[in-house]
Image: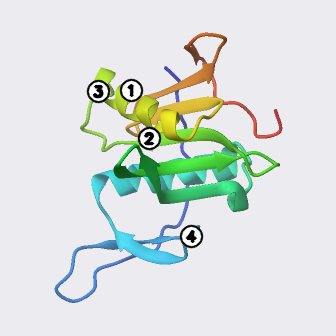
Amino acid sequence: MIKIYYPTHSFRIREPEEKKEEIWDELRKIWVRLTPEEWVRQNFIQYLLQVKNYPATYIAVERSMKLGELNKRFDLMIFDGSARPWMLVECKAMEEKLNSRVMWQVLRYNLATPVKYIVITNGEECHAFVRGLIDFEEISALPSYDE
């Protein structure tokens, strides 16, 4: 497991009349509903930007992907300098356990869009894996972007 120390950040949060709380997504430049999963996603994005120095322009947030006949949405996709998918991040709410069901979910996404790194997090726990010769192997730290 990787211990993540989230940086402080001044998130913009609002509560429009007769609606649920929303948070400003700086990457997508839109207000999104502030769910427990969204809170984890926004904090993890800030970790990638501020601590790991990943370029914001290479991070895609909640985009559709085709998985066979199904339309699915990944949480975060980080692209390499050649604009190829490099890392896939699946965010869950803090109260959700990171179990084999979560891992299989992200592995299915990897079938549609193969990546070198897979990360699953619920904000408290974080596990990262690198593609090996046969399978994904767990790693003890997230890679620097310039690797």
> How far apart are labels 1 and 4 at the CA level?
27 Å
Q: In the image, is residue 146 above or below residue 29?
A: above
Q: Residue at x 28, y 80 (%)?
A: 15
Q: In the image, is residue 110 above or below residue 71?
A: above
Packing grade of label 3 (10 A; few <14, some 14-19, many >=20) is: few
> How far apart are labels 3 and 4 at the CA level?
30 Å
Q: Residue at x 74, y 48 (%)?
A: 53
> How far apart are labels 1 and 3 at the CA level?
5 Å
Residue at the farthest left position: 18
Task: Choose between 77 and 97: the one closer to the eye.
Answer: 77
Q: Which residue is mark 3?
A: 101
Tell me if 8 is positioned left or right of 92 in this view. right
Residue 18 - label: none
> How far apart are labels 2 and 1 at the CA level?
9 Å
Residue at the farthest bottom position: 17
Q: Which residue is mark 1?
A: 103
Q: Which residue is mark 2?
A: 90
Task: Choose between 130 and 68: the one closer to the eye.
Answer: 68
Q: How many marks?
A: 4
